[in-house]
Structures are given as C-alpha cells and as structure tokens.
Image (tube, helix red, strand yellow):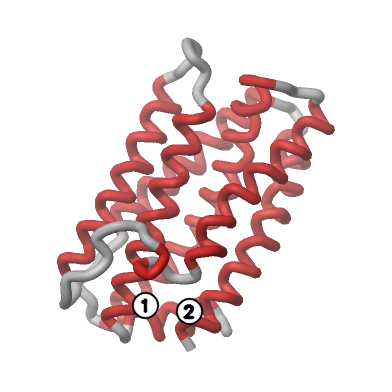
C-alpha cells in the first residue's frame, strides 16, 4: 500500500488519526532525546541545542493537534496509543545502532566522537525522511479538510536538513558517500515500518 493511501485511511478515521499524530509525536520526542544523549558534556554548539529544542517542540505540537480531533485519546505513549508500537520503538534505535556500527568501521571512532558522528548521519537520514513524509501528510490533511496542520513542521524540518548538510560537510569531504549508505539503511527500516503500518490501518 502506498504512503498516501495509508495516510488517507488514517486521516479518515479519528481513532487512527489520533494514534498517528501520537506516533509522530513519539518519534519526534525520541529523536530529541537521541540528540540530547549524543551531546558532549561541554562541547555543545547552538545548532545542537536548537535542533533538540525544535524536535521537542514538534513532539509537543503534534500532541496538541490531538485537540482538533474528536475524543479524549492518546494521553501518553503507551503501546495501545501508538500505531505499530513495536516497529515504531525499534525503528530509531535500530537505525542508530546500525549507523554507529558502520561509522565505527569506516572512521574508527569511539566514545563521544562516535556519538556525534552518529547524530549527524542519523539525523540527516531522518530529516530526508521527514522532508518526504510530512508534505504527503499535509496534502492528505488539506484534501480531507482536516483542522490538523503540519506546515510549520515542514518548514522547520527543511531548515534542519540544511543545517545537517552544513555540519556533515565540515565532518568529512566524503560525507555524501557515507550519507547515501545511511539513507539506504533508513529506507529499508522505513519500508518495514510502513508495511506494518499499512497492515494495521487497511
């Protein structure tokens, strides 16, 4: 099932839509926590703080969008309030582990340097995904006449992607080669996630 068709099924059902918003909120929050966990104890620049803060804000914003749907749903991130909860919770962690393993082999990094490199590449891959997913979701929302809106997130995610590219260019002259590998990892994991999502909402 195509992403747009999946999202149309979700948006047309308030319970599914609530869980979808909550799932996106969970993932944004998980991403923010990953960013904070990757921080050096002292060497923390403004971009990292900004990025973590904005990801937390996205999690909050998506959670607040639930008020625009009927019902009193999804107060927490428990499994019954998420879509494909096991795959959702596995997705970002699995990508992080795979990328760390790859970067350790390619750059011989350990400790804080490995954490920071993983932050750069994982975040880049996630921002590429966000740049694809959120506009499709917004199109579905607009066509459905939904009160839910993610336009502000789309704008900020575009800015995040540009910031990640700038940091990756500083990190390595060959960053694109390695980023392509990481993006392929993410694509495989996302394909598995979206397949399971499609089964749940069809």
Please report the residue visible at 49 percent of the width from the left and 38 percent of the height from the top: 34
First along the sequence among labels 1 and 2: 2
Question: Would you place residue 163 above or below residue 96 in this image?
Answer: above
Q: Position of residue 201 (x, y in %)?
A: 45, 83
Question: Would you place residue 133 above or below residue 57 in this image?
Answer: below
Which dot marks residue 140? 1
How crowded pointer 2 is (Cα within 10 Å; few <14, some 14-19, many 20+) is rated as: some
Image quadrant of residue 169?
Answer: top right
Please report the residue visible at 51 percent of the width from the left and 61 percent of the height from the top: 88
Q: Nearer the viewer, residue 98 or 174?
A: 98
- In the image: residue 59, left or right of residue 198: left
Q: Position of residue 199 (x, y in %)?
A: 55, 83
Please report the residue visible at 35 percent of the width from the left and 58 percent of the height from the top: 77
How crowded pointer 1 is (Cα within 10 Å; few <14, some 14-19, many 20+) is rated as: many
Q: Position of residue 5 (x, y in %)?
A: 48, 84
- Tag 1 near tag 2, CB within 8 Å: yes
In three-dimensional space, the C-alpha distance between marks 1 and 2, rounded to whole angstroms, equals 7 Å
Which dot marks residue 4? 2
- In the image: residue 186, left or right of residue 20: right
The local secondary structure at tag 2 comes to helix
Q: Nearer the viewer, residue 152 or 2?
A: 2
Question: Would you place residue 26 above or below residue 110 in this image?
Answer: below
Q: Nearer the viewer, residue 27 or 11?
A: 27
Q: Position of residue 106 (x, y in %)?
A: 82, 32
Name the outermost residue toward the top: 42
Please report the residue visible at 31 percent of the width from the left and 60 percent of the height from the top: 150
């Amino acid at each position: 099932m195509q992403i747009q068709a999946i999202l149309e099924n979700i948006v047309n059902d308030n319970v599914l839509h609530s869980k979808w918003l909550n799932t996106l909120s969970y993932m944004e929050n998980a991403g923010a926590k990953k960013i904070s966990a990757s921080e050096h104890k002292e060497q923390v620049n403004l971009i990292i703080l900004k990025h973590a803060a904005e990801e937390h804000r996205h999690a909050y914003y998506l959670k607040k969008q639930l008020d625009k749907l009927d019902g009193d749903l999804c107060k927490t991130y428990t499994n019954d309030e998420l879509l494909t909860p096991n795959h959702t919770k596995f997705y970002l962690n699995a990508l992080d582990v795979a990328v760390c393993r790859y970067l350790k082999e390619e750059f011989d990094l350990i400790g804080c340097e490995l954490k920071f490199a993983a932050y750069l590449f994982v975040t880049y891959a996630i921002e590429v995904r966000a740049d694809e997913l959120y506009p499709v979701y917004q199109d579905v929302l607009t066509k459905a006449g939904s009160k839910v809106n993610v336009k502000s997130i789309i704008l900020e995610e575009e800015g995040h992607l540009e910031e990640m590219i700038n940091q990756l260019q500083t990190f390595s002259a060959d960053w694109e080669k390695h980023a392509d590998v990481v993006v392929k990892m993410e694509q495989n994991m996302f394909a598995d996630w979206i397949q399971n999502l499609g089964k749940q909402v069809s």
